[in-house]
């Protein structure tokens, strides 16, 4: 078995072992001294059996410390703090995003047993932000603490650069497709809720029509007016339409929770991978290239100083700087390999999450089946109540006949 396969198996086992859900509740909106409302969050974790309160700024510091300690790992992004004219919908959206963030972090193998997460989920004091900073201060990042950091190159395949490029392109394509799927799923769920509103209003208007007490003028009636019968039939239909609306809302909410929200979770994970790839290219790789360029310039200066017979002290200083730069380049090379090693593991973690897509699709199909089944039952129960309105054979509606011409102006 290859080292990559062993790594993948270990990652899968760690993922299953650390699959911890963190549930959220909104507690209250507390006015600050600037009159800006803020939403506190309470987290309940099965692992620590305790409840803690966290504000958005606590999440910001936690996120910063994760990036500082684990720069070569997938750290999910945080939702925006606030937007102009933020309303309940924005606050709920942010609450959901924070829930996804903490669940992804709690399920990530290197994060799941780290002291940062343990403190964030269990510390009940008021200065959690300072405690988080103290944990990271002077410790160094994962490269400094991982015993395999200097050997990372030995665990990488020979064609790591090609595999990295291919994986990045694959994840980009998957992200683009699932982004569109999430948008369509949002619209489907939204239409179900809009349909519920329309059904409810439709039923209320039928009820209002049936409850109308305006007397029927004698000149408006023909021999036998059916308006009274129609009103009695229409009056009781609002109950069924309210039930239909309730079923539509249930379907829309279920698809928001079981389909849209899980698609958002998957998209957050994919976005964190894309961000990691960008950090690799713009961070350690770019710094390594700059260090090599600086080293090349120093070597040229050394050659020039030797040719020009400059003072020994200046030559020695230049030699010392070159040695320092060589050590810096060696460290950056090791960091570059460690970054690729982490990217290799994070790519495997993405593929561990991929089966989630089949569960999302299954949830969508089941929701559609159940929703249509329940609504069909209500429609079928409603149909017999309309029988008094149908005057044709087989209880099927027939278009009204034109009255005899002589009846238009009868005395």
Image: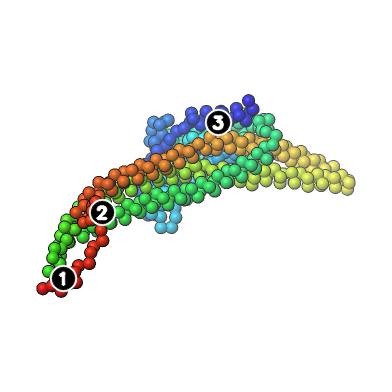
Query: Is there CB contact under 8 Å for labels 2 and 3?
Result: no
Residue wearing tag 2: 396
Q: Residues within 10 Å of mark 3 (few under 14, many from 20)?
A: many
Q: Residues within 10 Å of mark 2 (few under 14, many from 20)?
A: few
* Residue 74, image x, y percentages: 55, 40
Q: Earlier in the sequence, mark 2 or mark 3?
A: 3
Q: Secondary structure at mark 2?
A: loop
- At 35% from the left and 44% from the top, the residue drawn is 371
Q: Residues within 10 Å of mark 1 (few under 14, many from 20)?
A: few
* Screen quadrant of the C terminus: bottom left
* Screen quadrant of the N terminus: top right
Instruction: Give the number of the disc on residue 407.
Output: 1
- At 50% from the left and 36% from the top, the residue drawn is 355
Q: Earlier in the sequence, mark 1 or mark 3?
A: 3
Residue wearing tag 3: 11
From the viewer's perspective, is 368 left or right of 133? Answer: left
Q: CA distance from mark 2 to mark 3?
A: 63 Å
Residue 17 in view, yes or no: yes
Q: CA distance from mark 1 to mark 3?
A: 86 Å
* Residue 96, image x, y percentages: 42, 45
Mark 2 against mark 3, which lies toward the viewer? 2
* Residue 400, image x, y percentages: 23, 62
From the viewer's perspective, is 276 left or right of 234? Answer: right
């Amino acid at each position: 078995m290859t080292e990559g396969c062993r790594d993948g198996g270990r990652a899968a086992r760690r993922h299953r072992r650390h699959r911890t859900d963190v549930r959220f509740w909104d507690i209250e909106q507390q006015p600050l001294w600037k009159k800006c409302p803020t939403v506190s969050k309470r987290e309940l974790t099965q692992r620590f059996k305790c409840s803690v309160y966290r504000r958005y700024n606590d999440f910001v510091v936690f996120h910063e410390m994760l990036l500082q300690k684990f720069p070569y790992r997938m750290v999910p992004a945080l939702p925006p703090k606030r937007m102009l004219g933020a309303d309940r919908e924005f606050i709920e959206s942010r609450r959901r995003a924070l829930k996804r963030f903490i669940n992804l972090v709690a399920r990530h193998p290197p994060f799941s047993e780290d002291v940062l997460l343990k403190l964030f989920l269990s510390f009940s004091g008021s200065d959690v932000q300072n405690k988080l900073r103290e944990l990271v201060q002077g410790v160094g990042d994962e490269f400094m603490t991982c015993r395999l950091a200097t050997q990372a190159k030995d665990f990488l395949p020979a064609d790591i650069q090609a595999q990295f490029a291919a994986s990045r392109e694959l994840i980009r394509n998957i992200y683009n497709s699932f982004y569109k799927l999430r948008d369509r799923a949002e619209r489907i769920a939204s239409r179900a809720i809009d349909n519920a509103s329309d059904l409810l209003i439709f039923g209320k208007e039928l009820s209002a029509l049936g409850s109308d007490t305006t007397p029927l003028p004698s000149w408006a009636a023909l021999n036998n007016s059916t308006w009274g019968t129609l009103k009695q039939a229409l009056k009781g239909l609002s109950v069924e339409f309210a039930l239909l609306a309730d079923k539509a809302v249930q379907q829309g909410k279920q698809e928001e929770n079981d389909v849209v929200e899980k698609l958002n979770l998957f998209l957050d994970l994919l976005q964190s991978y894309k961000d990691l790839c960008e950090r690799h290219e713009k961070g350690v790789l770019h710094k390594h290239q700059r260090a090599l360029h600086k080293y090349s310039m120093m070597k040229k200066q050394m050659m020039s100083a030797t040719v020009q017979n400059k003072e020994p002290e200046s030559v020695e200083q230049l030699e010392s700087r070159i040695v320092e730069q060589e050590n810096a380049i060696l460290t950056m090379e090791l960091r570059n390999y460690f970054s690729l090693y982490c990217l290799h593991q994070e790519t495997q973690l993405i593929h561990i999450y991929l089966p989630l897509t089949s569960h999302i699709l299954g949830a969508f199909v089941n929701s559609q089946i159940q929703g249509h089944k329940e609504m069909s039952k209500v429609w079928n129960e409603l149909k017999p109540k309309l029988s008094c309105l149908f005057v044709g054979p087989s209880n099927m509606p027939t278009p009204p006949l034109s009255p005899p011409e002589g009846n238009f102006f009868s005395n």
